[in-house]
Image (tube, grey):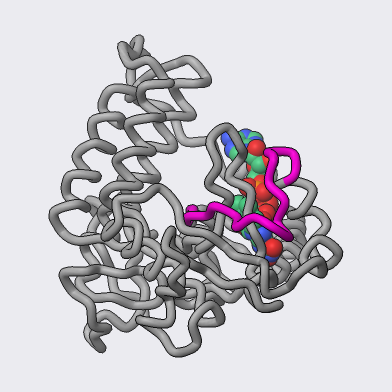
Amino acid sequence: MEFAQFHPTALAMEGAPRFLISEAVRGEGAWIVNRDGKRFVLDVDPRGELAGRDVVARAIWEELERSGERCVFLDCSPLGARAAVRFPTIAATCARYGLDITRQPIPVSPAAHYMIGGVTTDLDGATSVPGLYACGEVAHTGVHGANRLASNSLLESLVFSQRAVHAALGWAGESPPGQPRPTKVTSRPRASTLDPRDGWNALRDALWAGAGVVRDQTGLRAAARSCDDVVAATSGGTTLSTMQLHAAASTASLVCAAALAREESRGCHLRSDLPQASDQWYGDLVMHKDRGARFDRHL
Ligand SMILES: Cc1cc2nc3c(=O)[nH]c(=O)nc-3n(C[C@H](O)[C@H](O)[C@H](O)COP(=O)(O)OP(=O)(O)OC[C@H]3O[C@@H](n4cnc5c(N)ncnc54)[C@H](O)[C@@H]3O)c2cc1C
């Protein structure tokens, strides 16, 4: 759960959605610059804008921390008028917010993009619960390593969905009817005093500040405390919005716990206090509810 991938360049304009500006724009020759027009990514990697997703996201994050700005800019001027022809959807979306990408730089900042971890499955989508299959972003098949390659959701949607459906049909055909039984809910319902909007804002702020592109122990501990507060405040809630918030806070809490446990930097998990990868941490962390949420190394 510590491996949350960030996309380096999401549109960062007041009132506009966090629309992704595809990496293909950089592939075609656009530059990432700060307010002074400097191509700062070149300072950390000679590949500049063509460096990996994690490298570029981290360079932007650090530039934002250094400058105190809310965004950097994607400058499409090297593409000239070709920018709008080659990327009509991006051009049209930006135009809706008053931005002409052939003449004006696009304000961008990193955004959460893909959860590499998830429910542990085998290569047929089977989880540890008999009859429960998971596929898609929610599943952890292990195929993405610590740094998913762009567009590999296709693998999840085309390959693993089919495998999971076949395996589930096979399981249903072989298993006696009535299995498995749903787990009995033991918690007593109670009203939550937390306004869900406040809870979502608290979660968002805590994760961005403490479990974002670059993490460290202090920030992760603070984020974990905030997530746990929301978990506690929504526990046993019976409205849909409270239950959704409870599920999100529980997931966020697992992200923080896993990121704290992995004492190294690897792939898209970047710890400023532990910047090197360590052989000791080569492998997966798997959390087991029945074993008190401890971590098991699963190589
Ligand atoms: C902005 C953006 C751009 C992306 N671009 C690319 C790309 O170019 N290439 C690429 O490969 N990947 C891309 N990704 C990643 C990819 O889109 C996702 O990984 C993929 O769509 C996930 O599909 P999914 O079906 O597993 O999950 P989702 O699309 O998240 O579907 C899960 C569904 O389950 C529903 N649901 C949730 N809880 C419940 C419940 N309790 N009961 C019933 N239903 C429920 C949700 O409403 C949702 O409809 C992008 C992601 C983002 C955010």
Residue 184, percent from left and from top? 44, 30
How far across and how far down the image is residue 26, in percent? Answer: 63, 73
The quarter holding residue 64 reads bottom left
Locate the N terminus and report the quarter of the image it occupies.
bottom left
Quadrant (top left/top right/bottom left/bottom right) for the C terminus: bottom left
Residue for point 43% across, 35% down: 247
- Image point (29%, 51%), residue name: 68
Q: Is residue 175 visible?
A: no
- The answer to whether residue 296 is left or right of residue 111 is left
Position above or below: 196 against 178: above
What range of the chain is rendered magenta? 95-112
Residue 177 lies in quadrant:
top right
In the picture, residue 31 is in which quadrant?
Answer: bottom right
Residue 95 percent location from the top left of the image: 75, 44
- Residue 109 is situated, as x and y percent measured from the top left of the image, at 48, 55
Q: Residue at x 36, y 73 (%)?
A: 284
Would residue 6 be seen by someone viewing this image from the given angle?
yes
Q: Is residue 192 left or right of residue 216?
A: right
Q: Is residue 61 left or right of residue 296?
A: right
Total count of labels: 0
Q: Is residue 109 magenta?
A: yes
Vertical side of 122 occupied by 210: above or below: above
Q: Is residue 269 left or right of residue 174?
A: left
Instruction: Please name the residue shown 36% across and 81% down the image.
Output: 43
- Relative to the observer, which residue lies in front, 291 or 80? 80
Judge whether residue 195 is colored magenta.
no
